[in-house]
């Protein structure tokens, strides 16, 4: 199942810089692991925002929730998810 996911990060302005550095490093490692596994095939930054648009390729809604809630930045994110379906006008590869 494919999902379009927008993630907006909202770190507290008073967060300790060392805590921020640690969380961001763990986030990067976790996201790259999911990318290598093929679960997170597309990741784009939104220009001018601390946000991204991603495509996840997972087996179920539950798996997506598990992966998203495992993100170290999850407590600091606003996340919007849209399930995707094949469009009948798409030219096949």
Image (tube, rainbow, N blue to C red):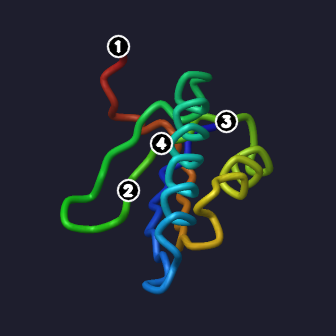
- Where does residue 91 sit, x and y in percent of width and height? 30, 23
The disc, 3 or 2, on the residue closer to the chain's N-terminal end is 2
Residue 58 - label: 3
Counting from the top left corner in percent of width and height, residue 69 is at: 71, 58
- Toward the bottom, the furthest residue is 14
Residue 59 located left or right of residue 10 = right
Q: Position of residue 27 (x, y in %)?
A: 56, 49
Labels 4 & 2 near each other (Cβ < 8 A): no
Q: Which residue is mark 1?
A: 93
The residue lying at 39 percent from left, 41 percent from top is 43
* Closer to the eye: label 3 or 2: 2
Provide the secondary structure element on which disc 4 rests: strand
Instruction: State whether residue 63 is above or below residue 39.
Output: below
Q: Which residue is identified by label 4?
A: 55
Residues at circles 3 and 2 in contact by the CB criterion of under 8 Å: no
Q: Secondary structure at mark 2?
A: strand
Q: CA distance from mark 3 to mark 1?
A: 21 Å
Q: Which SS class for mark 3? A: loop
């Amino acid at each position: 199942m494919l999902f379009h996911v927008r993630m907006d990060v909202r770190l507290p302005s008073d967060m300790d810089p060392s805590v921020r550095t640690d969380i961001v490093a763990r986030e990067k490692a976790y996201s790259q692991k999911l990318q290598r596994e093929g679960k997170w095939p597309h990741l784009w930054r939104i220009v001018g925002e601390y946000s991204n648009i991603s495509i996840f390729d997972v087996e179920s809604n539950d798996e997506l929730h598990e992966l998203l809630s495992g993100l170290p930045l999850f407590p600091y994110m606003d996340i919007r998810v849209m399930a995707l379906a094949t469009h009948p006008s798409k030219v096949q590869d």
